[in-house]
Image: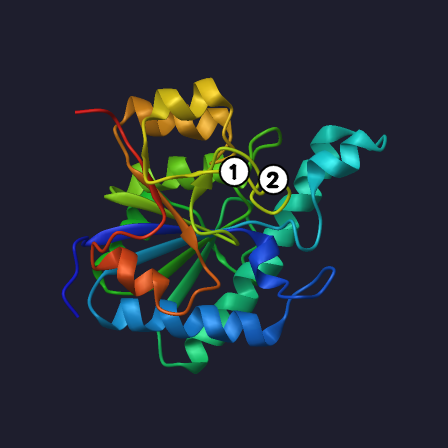
Amino acid sequence: MPTKYKRILLKLSGEALMGSQAYGIDPAVVEEVSREVAEVAKSGVELAVVIGGGNIFRGIAASAKGMERASADYMGMLATVLNALALQNSLEKMGVPTRVLSAIEMKELAEAYIRRRAVRHLEKKRVVIFAAGTGNPYFTTDTAAALRAMEIGAEVIMKATKVDGVYSADPMKDKTATKFDELSYIEVLQKGLKVMDATAISLCMDNDLPIIVFNLTSPGNIKKVVAGKKVGTIVRGKK
């Protein structure tokens, strides 16, 4: 499979693993995602994954209901570890070597995150799954994805969602919403578009790291993005 990128970071939301369930992990969805990730990994692309925890616990929502924000965020980070282990298990069953690197030390479950170690795993063609966000409260997994992508020298962030790109409004609620094929970082911030949070977008803008937003539920989309085909919406600096 011809590929445009040599090293990529795939950002998966926790909600993507729920399938049609109200919460939790749908094993069939994890298997489907793993199958596509496995195909990309076996093509020789160096692939890292940052996974959210919103399907199990969302810190911001809990803090809005009275829980202390820092505690709620740490609980959210632990939820990402559950998702990372589920993805790892599925990928390993498919013969793909993986490593889970956690920003919060839990040596019985995962390796502690060390940048040079992560890069070495990628060079050895292991899929690296980053868990526990940045390890700090008040930072989202979007920000963790932007940070890790820059630390490992990824060429692009692939943000997998439930819609086929970035729209002017929520296409599920507004039938007049229009899809953007390309946006600049500034446009995303000025229009308040829900691509990634403002901290993540600013990090990507400062380091000229492109973001491709695409639909995870369409089979073959991950491979298409890696091959450089036009899928979803690309966010980058204006040339």
Q: Residue at x 67, y 40 (%)?
A: 74
Foreground pick, 2 / 102? 2
Residue beneath disc 2? 174
Foreground pick, 205 / 129? 205
Which quadrant of the figure has residue 208?
top left
| Image position, residue 168 (x, y; %) | 49, 33
Per the image, label 2 sits on a secondary structure element best described as loop
Give, as a three-letter code, the residue at label 2.
Answer: Asp
Which quadrant of the figure has residue 226?
bottom left
- Is residue 1 at least partly visible in the picture? yes
Residue beneath disc 1? 177
**Do residues under tags 2 and 1 come within 8 Å of each other at their CB atoms?**
yes
Tell me if mark 1 has few (under 14), some (14-19) or many (20+) residues whose alpha carbon lies within 10 angstroms of its own.
Answer: some
* Above-or-below relation of 209 to 30: above
Whole-Å distance between the Cαs marked 2 and 1? 6 Å
Foreground pick, 31 / 22? 22
Tell me if mark 2 has few (under 14), some (14-19) or many (20+) residues whose alpha carbon lies within 10 angstroms of its own.
Answer: few
| Image position, residue 222 (x, y; %) | 34, 61
Give, as a three-letter code, the residue at label 1.
Answer: Ala
Residue 10 got which mark? none
Foreground pick, 79 / 234? 234
Q: Residue at x 70, y 55 (%)?
A: 56
| Image position, residue 132 (x, y; %) | 55, 46
* Above-or-below relation of 117 to 25: above
